[in-house]
Image (tube, helix red, strand yellow):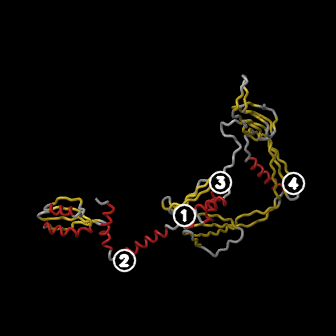
Amino acid sequence: MLSDVSVFLRGSCRFTATGDFPERFLNLCARSDMGLWDIRRTDGGVSARVIAGRYRLLLPCARRCGVRLSVTRRYGLPFRLLPYRRRPGMPLGFLLFCGTLWFLSLFIWSVRLPVLSPEVSTELEQALDDMGVSVGSLRSEVDGDRMSIELQMRVPDLTWAGISTFGSSVTVEAKEYEPVAIIPKVGEPCNLIAARDGIILDIDYLRGEVEVQPGQAVVKGDLLVSGVVEHLDGSVQITEASAAVWARTTHRITCTIPYRQTITQRTGRLITRHRVRLFSLELPLLSGIDTEGLYEREYSEWHLTVGTMELPFEVRTERCYEQEQIPVEYTPEQAEQLAAEELERRAAELDCAEIIDSRCTFTQGEHSVTAVMELTVKEDIASPSPIGIQ
């Protein structure tokens, strides 16, 4: 039995054989290897299917047996295309479709990027775009081995990179540089040392040997909690010291505000420009508008997608907000107010549990006001330090 696909492409027909000796006709067909199948008995004869090209070969067998053949039904692709044989646009359209499909297969249709930090991802996308690895680029111009080395040179934060091509899809794999942390891993022996100068207020002890007491002054680098614990029986245990050592520390924040400044603000004029990118070709939709000068620019992109597949057609929108620089002059009181607001903002960014006290001093100069904030805060100054074991 031929496969269904082969039968569909070659075409087949069902016929009936009626006469005095249809059984003899079937025997002759079997000896001649005609390949009949789906044989059924009908009133006055038999019915079967055969490849369309072999039907004429059945006529000599039918004459020898005195049976009459008649086609009852036709199947397959040749018979479905038969009504279009007088329409030259059909084969021309088919050839055009195949040519378009081949032409589109020469380009990159999707680029898969690895998951990295936002800064490195932006740098990676820009480097790939400069190298010509983007949706719509020619697939033949993507040399994975060479571009992998070039990508590492363009993006220094990558320790490894690889570019592979499969069909019209490009996969970029990369590993971001991760600095070696000096903090020991969980479970490794370590001490706790002071990260800043301060006066110990409280200790939330979990594990280790406490070396300081509340009210004691420490400097940066002093041992707070030791990971070497000596028991009463004289045995020594090396463990991971764990505790929160709260101390009173001081921070100094300085800010200078000039009396005369130049601020930049939008004028309200907006220029929007669009560019259409088809494969690697970019076409501007609006040109002739001058955007030289001081403008704040915002970019957005719209990609044509089918399902989860991104097609090589996108519309890039550039919005240009015109800006102007305006000179302003503050009084000493206004400058002090601005400096105080800036100091408050910086103080709120400090990683501390509580601000105990704060003092601000302002010094008015000839051209600016200098503000200094002295903060007394409560914070955890314990910092892990690995224990070297020989």
Residue 57: percent from left, percent from top: 22, 69
CA–CA distance in space, label 4 to label 2: 91 Å
Residue 38: percent from left, percent from top: 23, 59
Q: Nearer the viewer, residue 48 or 62?
A: 62
The answer to whether 205 is drawn above or below residue 133 in the figure is above
Whether tag 4 and tag 3 are in contact, CB under 8 A, the answer is: no
Q: Secondary structure at mark 2?
A: loop
Q: Quadrant of the N terminus?
A: bottom left
User: Where does label 2 land, which residue?
Assistant: 88
Q: Secondary structure at mark 4?
A: strand
Residue at the far top: name it.
233
Residue 238: percent from left, percent from top: 70, 32
Residue at the far front: name it.
31
User: Where does label 4 land, which residue?
Assistant: 364
User: Where does label 3 land, which residue?
Assistant: 159
- Say whether residue 78 is left or right of residue 184: left
Residue drawn at x 78%, y 63% is 262
User: Where does label 1 land, which residue?
Assistant: 303
Within 10 Å of disc 1 (Cα), the crowding (few <14, some 14-19, many 20+) is few
Q: Earlier in the sequence, mark 2 or mark 3?
A: 2
